[in-house]
Image (tube, grey):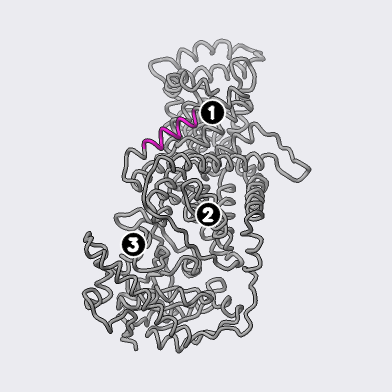
Amino acid sequence: METASPQIKNKSISVALLGNPNSGKTTLFNSLTGLNQKTGNYPGVTVDKHVGTTKTTNGIKLSITDLPGTYSLYPKSLDEEVACKVLLGNDIDVSVVVTDSSNLKRHLLLATQVIDLKIPVIVVLNMIDEADALGLKINKEELSRLLGVKIVAVNSRTKEGFEELKSIITGATISENTFYDVSKPNELSATGFKNIIEKQFEKNEEYKTKLDLFEEKDTVYRFNVINYIFAKTVTLPQNATRTFSDKADKVITHPIFGYGILLLVLFVVFQFIFFIAEFPMAWIENSFAFFMEKTSAILPAGQLNDLLVNGVLAGLSGIVVFIPQIALLFLFIGLLEDSGYMARVSFIMDKIFRRFGLNGKSVIPIVSGVACAVPSILGARTISNYKERLITILVIPLMSCSARLPVYTLLISLMVPDEMIFGIFNLKGIILLGMYLLGFVATLATAFVLKLIVKTKEKSYFIMELPVYRMPQWKSIGVIVVGKVKVFLWEAGKVIMAISIVLWFLSSHGPENDFEKIEQKFSQQINTPNNNSKQELIKQMQAQKLEASYAGRLGKKIEPAIKPLGFDWKIGIALITSFAAREVFVGTMATIYSANDSENITSVREKLILEKDETGKPKYNAAVCLSLLVFYAFAMQCMSTMAVVLRETKSWNWTLIQFFYMTGLAYLSSYLVYNLF
């Protein structure tokens, strides 16, 4: 039975989209809202909040919130707790429960719980095409009658059923059916299911003990009801055959071949990141060089010209040039997740991870660390075991994230020639893969050490559903890639730009009259008629002015500490500024090497290639580049990551231990590499 739908206010409806992990919920969200999305945080927590909008055919605005994936309203992680609290609040008009049509029985557990909250609910049968391919027949009308809510079948990849879904949302109803056991009323069930769920967030140990007993009995009772509903509404195929996913998993999750396939996938990804991105990156570099040259020529010489060319444009070029590689990295991550392969990575890595104090649930956060450590650390909230969650949080920053990618790219391009191995494999791509594997090895080694240090009596378990393999949804992945690039441009970009401008000032100005003295020293020689060494003298003057600047003096103070690593005072400045964000290193180098040099408009890579040491040899040789690569592979160098580690561990001790360990590991490793080479 159904009750009347809630009144629509101001032609706008607030919708909560929820479902089990791997139900296709986020794909549905992206397909419904497209680029009309914004990302923030839920009040009081750092869990991502994704909100998007769409409209029905009659102009009603639907504001859709994509809740974190959850299996139940008895939360076992912070993500599930957030989803539960949103449903219990008063800000949601309609709840849309997304289920996987090919695995309906398990997904109905959450659906019946949400229905029992007595809020307007719609149940979506997602991926209906996959159920049809398996020969499953679902009686929507009977399912709607038994649940007491409206049912709509959709295919989030083709948008089949979308208009019907949006129309039904405007008429969502509260079911009068009940799915928890009210035939045997006890202290909890007599109060109503919504009240039971609300009270579980109280700090009452006695109530929690009673709730645990109730949850166990309630789940058994629900599945008995669900088995009846499933038998009445779903017709199974008479001659079930092995699906493509079953056959593919025989190879992809094989205890030996599975690891080989994983390495092959990673190898191909990094080959593509270097090979494909090379062309748009070259175009971007040339475009910025052109704009910098034109700007320098159009504006009169002076502070404004220098600021725009060597501060703003030089810093901006250090951001934009890496967009192709950032986009490709997130594209491949999206493809691996959307196809179902990433879940297999968790499955095959579980046995290995357990030996290092982790489990299969640690795989997704750790692997996702190649994108960004911050959301990956937040993703560790799905790990219920305290020890494994803590170890996962502490080792994630050792994975090479996308912020390191610009640094790796720049340094690898300096030390590795444009060579192909066997005529097809890009040598730079192989080195880049090596850097990511180095981070992974360090991650496991550190986890093993922490396993011996951190003690706990909690038992560990790993349960994961393997979704069927499916063709990636290109539009959905495109939305994710565009969103990530925008975040990179805005979040990292504004930091890089701010630091670039500050650095420009510090590099272009010095105390007292030092700059005037240097100019006077060189002016007579530079202005001598028919002077063939004029350009060389200008370069010497600019080098001395940079050394005498505020930035130069700061770099000189820290140079003794980093000289054993092969670093000079210019690199020292970049090490300090890049603590705000690792990718700032490239922008810093671009600004430093552009300071007082508005006539020489070249890319930062070309300027570093031309840089000489005190002996007249190339400064950025293999030893220096390898030393820098290893330093950035291990060093923390990220304030945002430290902040989120502190928030998640609620411990300054663990945060500082992580920082000093990573910094010490980076320094020692860099020292050894430099002296070996």
> Disc 1 marks which residue?
670
Element type at marker 3? helix
Q: Is residue 672 visible?
A: yes
Q: What is the x, y in percent for residue 189?
A: 25, 76
Which amino acid is tagged 3?
Answer: Glu
Does the magenta stretch mainly form a helix, a strand or a loop? helix
Q: Which residue is mark 3?
A: 81
Q: Earlier in the sequence, mark 1 or mark 3?
A: 3
Amino acid type, residue under disc 2 in the picture: Asp
Residue at 48% in and 32% down: 665
Q: What residue does disc 2 label?
A: 350
Q: Residue at x 41, y 65 (%)?
A: 70
Q: Position of residue 13 (x, y in %)?
A: 35, 74
Report the front residue among 31 and 344: 344
Say if residue 308 shows up in the picture.
no
Dot 2 crowding, Cα within 10 Å, few <14, some 14–19, many 20+: some
Q: Residue at x 54, y 76 (%)?
A: 102
Rendered position, 31 above or below 291:
below
Counting from the top left corner in percent of width and height, residue 74 is at: 34, 67
Instruction: Count all numbered tags in the image, as a single digit.
Output: 3
Q: Sequence order check: which comes first, mark 2 or mark 3?
A: 3
Residue 161 included in the magenta stretch of the image: no
- Quote the CA–CA distance across marks 2 and 3: 25 Å
Above-or-below relation of 171 to 413: below
Q: Which residues are magenta?
A: 656-667
Residue 265 percent location from the top left of the image: 64, 52
On screen, residue 534 above or below 226: above
In this view of the protein, which residue sits in the foreground, 137 or 643? 137
Give the foreground label among 2 and 3: 2
Q: In the rendered structure, which disc, 1 or 2, sits on the residue that comes first in sequence?
A: 2
Task: Using the numbered discs, state the Cα–Cα distance from disc 1 to disc 2 in whole angstroms.
Answer: 31 Å
**Type of residue at label 1?**
Ser
